Amino acid sequence: MDVLFLGPYHLFMLMSLMSNFTESVDVPEWVRWLAQDSDGTWWGYSVEPLRNDNGWYENEVGRYVRLGVGDAKGWESSLTKVKI
């Protein structure tokens, strides 16, 4: 699992993490984990998500936010811890 460091404004280019994704995304301050589902959707989570057959879910605790869509290749190993 990779660790991604965010700047003070929590704005970064996700294209370094997500293939075929070219937007800048405002990542909420509370996001501590990033993960991609099998359909290519990227999500931010406040707590470490759990994996199911098609993606990741918030484990009924914490918050989550949709960040965008990219190429889903390798989504199974997309879980990334965010440090600020």
Image: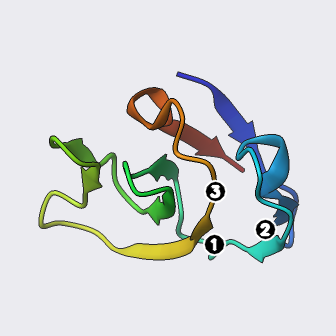
Decide which of 76, 2 is in the foreground and name it.
76
- Classify 10 Å Cα crowding around label 3: few (below 14), some (14-19), many (20 and above): many
Q: Could you say which is closer to the camera, residue 11 or residue 35?
A: 35
- Residues under numbered marks 1 and 3 in contact, where contact means CB atoms less than 8 Å apart: no
User: Which residue type does callout 2 highlight?
Assistant: His
Residue at numbered disc 2: 10
Query: Which SS class for mark 3?
Result: loop
Place of residue 40 in the rendered image (x, y in percent of width and height, measured from the top left): 50, 56
Mark 1 vs mark 3, foreground winner is 3
Q: Identify the residue shown where x is 52% and y is 51%.
A: 34
Whether label 2 touches label 1, CB < 8 Å: yes
Element assignment for label 1: loop
Q: Whole-percent x and y of residue 15?
A: 82, 51
Q: Nearer the viewer, mark 3 or mark 2?
A: 3
Return the residue at label 1.
29
Which residue is labeled 3 in the image?
Answer: 70
**Residue at image coords 73%, 42%:** 17
Mark 3 and mark 2: Cα distance apart in space: 20 Å
Who's the residue at 50% across and 35% down the image? Answer: 78
In this view, 38 is above or below 65: above
**Where 46 sits versus 75, above or below?**
below
Residue 7, position as x, y percentages in the image: 87, 58
The percent position of residue 23, horizontal first and vertical second, equals 84, 71
User: Closer to the N terminus: mark 2 or mark 1?
Assistant: 2
Residue at (74, 44) in percent of width and height? 19
